[in-house]
Amino acid sequence: MSDPPAGPLDSSLAVFRDPASVAVVGASSNPAKWGHWLARGALAGRDRRSVHLVSRNAGDILGAPTAPTLADLPEVPDLVALCVPAPQVAPVVDAALRLGVRGFLGITAGVPDPAGLAARITAAGARIIGPSSLGLYDAETRLHIAWGDFRPGRLAVVSQSGQVGSELAQLAQRAGLGISRFVSVGGQADVTMADLLDDLADHARTAVVALYAEGFDDGERLFAAVRRLRRAGKPVLVLSAGDSEAGARAARSHTSALTSPAEQVDAACRAAGALRLPTPAALVDVAACLTADVAPRGRRVAVLSDSGGQGALAADCAHRDGLAVPRLSGGLADEIAALLPPTAATDNPVDLAGAGEQNLSSYTAVASALLRSGEVDTVLLSGYFGRYGLDTAALARAERDEAAALAALPPRYRRALVVHSMGAEGDTAALLRDLGVPVFPTVGAATQALSGAVELDARPVRDAPAADPDVLAPRGFWETRAALLRAGIGFPEARLVRDQPQLLAATGELRPPYVLKATWIEHKTEAGGVRVGLADGAAATAAFDTMRRHLGEGAYLLEEQDVRPHVTELIVGARRAPGLGPMVTVGAGGTRAEVHRDTVTECAPLSPEQALDMIGRLRCAPLLTGWRGAPPADLDCLAQAVVAVSRLITRYRGDRVELEINPLRVGPDGAVAVDALLLAPAEGHDTQGEA
């Protein structure tokens, strides 16, 4: 379905942004307990809101008085943090609802019947985050009801796992980013990740959003929120768990077997303009580039180093990560040479050749020449800078001054500066970070982060597909074949046959050689349900008799065999990925599709340009473009077939619909489907349509 309209913000979530009053139920004086951390964080914001502590044990906690129950408080709190044993949660909630509480933060794990509890809360017009939440933090409103400390910053974290979210926050703090908002969603009994992402669209402090999800049951709605954030100028970086092939073990189609959950999430991220990263550290590294004073745009990188070896390694890393390290023009190389010793390298990488030790200002002079030239998009400074002050105290002041001068260059020239420093833990590096320049301890981390930021910047946002809820997938062989033919996908001439007279009539109408297939079998080769190269009617009759003895009566297909030269076999499949919507896959096809595992998956529907891009990303793509003197395949016809399949899958309702052509034989004179499979739910059971 298409993205729902953005509409007004959900006012019921305002209680989790800036409540006028907060109560921590289960507050504790024991520093090892959750109730202590929640109380400490909440009390830090009492100059903005009233904070109440509820504890069975009367007395002060952290210098603040406590009350034995919510009813004993002087006012009804807007937001109640639940940090009591699981059996006590429901009675506390019911009492709070009677008082008129508007919001709950469920910290406690193992709460009985969380769905029923959430239903009572929402029926009363209130909302709950959790249960099993690690907490909530908002730098904009100084709301802190969570375990741990947070440094204010520009990265928002929405995490299904509290501990993963906490790790992201800690890594962000070390990288000098800090957190704008932190929400551990826990069990999502009511408020969901999608709700919280939508609620960040107008959050002034947030520049980048980190999302950790362990499942995508509500993925289409979640990625609709991701699209809205990207269009609001807040890119989303995604971590996900569950990259398992367990679901593929029982797959009935090649497409299902070849497409992992991670590949489907990657496709959804690409369509929504988001980027999935493999680890929390990698995510924070990309976020550091995106939140820089000037974020990287474009793949052209100038490597600037005070070591020839480190410069060469940085250039290699940049190349491996898909970045370009272009040769500098003669004029620019001459300009840089005039700033450096005669032994300096001025091509790219640029090697200062000791000029930094003689005069630290050479760093800024060369970086300035590179950035204002227009020949590169980013300068990657790699090596010793940041270490001078650590190793030689007398140079500390001068190095910090040079760092400030370097940090002033990106805003001046509107091009990015990224630093790899051997002193990434020092004061100079900290100053660079504070001034909006990302600094990394390894050159590989720097180039990977730079590549990720550039890739995300270049990634457009695609609208979610519109679906017609009244369209059912075709049922049976002829309907499936007819649907594919109407969509513009070619098939060899063929006839359905059920007995010898029909077979003999078909041989008189079709051109040999023939192919004979049992249409109701999904994987025909393994079951002996296909025979190829049948030279004449006698061979076709013999094959038909043998196949019918082994497989029984049914609808068999006699087809003209595609014997065109210079043909490549591909697979084109589509399915509705549960929670994520329609997907299309293109890959190396035939009976060895699972062996090659050469596929590309994207969200459907596609444009012809997007289909051609998918085809070009295949490892087998050279076979289609004139491999070893062979004539090139008709790529436009292939792309049209991919587009047709991608559009068909968006029209069919149901999460278990699968459509597959394998193989699609592509040659210089077009593409022909020689086997196809459709699986779709109908009236409570699966039906198959084969062509």
Image (cartoon, helix red, strand yellow):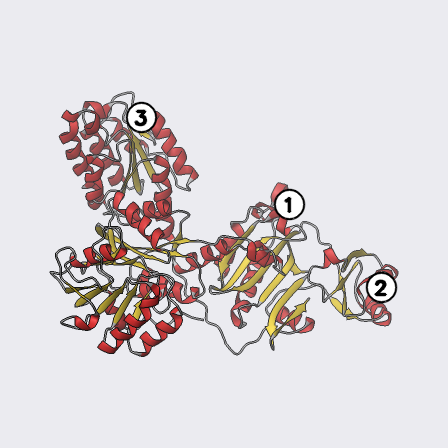
The amino acid pointed to by label 2 is Arg
Q: Which residue is mark 2?
A: 549
Q: Quadrant of the C terminus?
A: bottom right
**3 and 1 marks in contact (CB < 8 Å):** no
How far apart are the alpha carbons under marks 3 and 1? 47 Å
Q: Amino acid at mark 1?
A: Ala
- What residue is at 21 percent from the left and 70 percent from the top? 70
Query: Which residue has dot 3 on it?
Result: 307
Q: Identity of the amino acid at label 3? A: Ser
Q: CA distance from mark 2 to mark 3?
A: 76 Å
Choose the circle earlier in sequence order: 1 or 2.
2
Residue 619 in picture, x, y percent from top left? 55, 46
Q: Position of residue 125 (x, y in %)?
A: 28, 77
2 or 3: mark nearer the eye: 2
Q: Earlier in the sequence, mark 2 or mark 3?
A: 3
Mark 3 or 1, closer to the camera: 3
SS assignment at label 2: helix
